[in-house]
Image (tube, grey):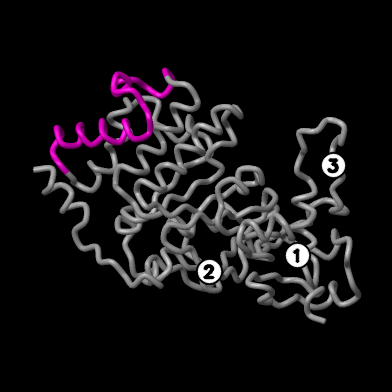
Amino acid sequence: MMNDVAQAMDAGSSQPGPDVPMLECRGVGRNFTVGKGFFSAKKTLRAVQDVNLQVKRGEVLAVVGESGCGKTTLAKMMLGLLKPTTGEIFIEGEPVSNVGIRQIARKVQPVFQDPYSSLNPRKTLEAIISLPLKVHGIGTKEERRQMVEDIMAMVELPKRLIHSYPNQLSGGQRQRVAVARALIMKPEVILCDEPTSALDVSVQAHILNMLQDLRDEMNLTYVFISHDLAVVEHLADNVAVMYLGRLIEYADSSSLFSDPQHPYSQALLDSVLTPDPSKGIPEIALGRAFPNPLEPPSGCSFHPRCSQVMDNCSIDNPAMLDRDERKVECHLFNN
């Protein structure tokens, strides 16, 4: 009977060629219309602009940047929760616009930032974790119970907690429940939106190590939304740096952390705190505050804060260039 359940979960799935990315964004943008007041004209907020990236099977892609740079909006589009205003997102070569939300949910599942607010406090762990199976009509009640117990064991949750409620668990246990709920449908992509930022440092390490083990065991692909560069360096294969809705640098993790090209990427890495107390708090060379996204600067959006600004930076928007097996959007490399 369990074999029948597995067949039902895999029904209709076909394996694309090995060169087809698990996730791909082609010229993806998302605009919002914002009204500032009753008598004020509405304005357009360009939350994400012309993003192009690929995530290969089994890869960990980290998307980093300051709050408000468009990371979460991009994640919601990847999940099918928002439709792009421009461009297209592909899952295993198929446009998301051609795929139903249930099909997307079978392939891509989220793990959110705050495990407490993302779990129904009135439901037991069994009800929370098994809900996707119930929604998709997979298995009998007894089969779903067994699948919940199996996935709880994988995320190191004791079986005795199956009838517990979220408020009876620690923060780390709640996040394990969120991971278990995401994995119960055996998706291929897990989209993690700051999954450890609400946890203690010691608990963070356990969750991150668990995610690494699950990646190897289940051949998972991760998209990791984060502003914690230490976590990104530990987990990511490739890193996409976003600023004011734009993808400004895209490189493999080792290259980005050893030799960042874009001035914004350099400033982000310079801002990381060091364990050495003698070095004090790092100085961040980012000029004035984050610009108003409703009134973005002309030319390169980063130029008002850039330490290497040139005359044409305030006039022309730089093109995305291929440079030493990485992509960077900066006038420094147009000359």
What kind of element bears circle 2?
A: loop
Position of 82 compared to 316: left or right? left
Q: Amino acid at mark 3?
A: Pro
Mark 3 or 2, nearer chain start:
2
Q: Residues within 10 Å of mark 2 (few under 14, many from 20)?
A: some
Q: Is residue 87 above or below residue 170?
A: below
Mark 1 or 2, nearer chain start:
2
Q: Amino acid at mark 1?
A: Gln
Q: Quick one: 208 or 91, which is closer to the camera?
A: 208
Q: Quick one: 46 or 200, which is closer to the camera?
A: 200
Q: Which mark is residue 282?
A: 3
Q: Which residues are magenta?
A: 139-168
What kind of element bears circle 3?
A: loop
Q: Position of residue 158 (x, y in %)?
A: 33, 23
Q: Which mark is residue 85?
A: 2
Q: Which residue is mark 1?
A: 261
Please identify the dominant SS of the magenta region: helix
Q: Position of residue 295 (x, y in %)?
A: 76, 62
Position of 85 compared to 332: left or right? left
Residue farthest toward the left in the current orientation of the protein: 1
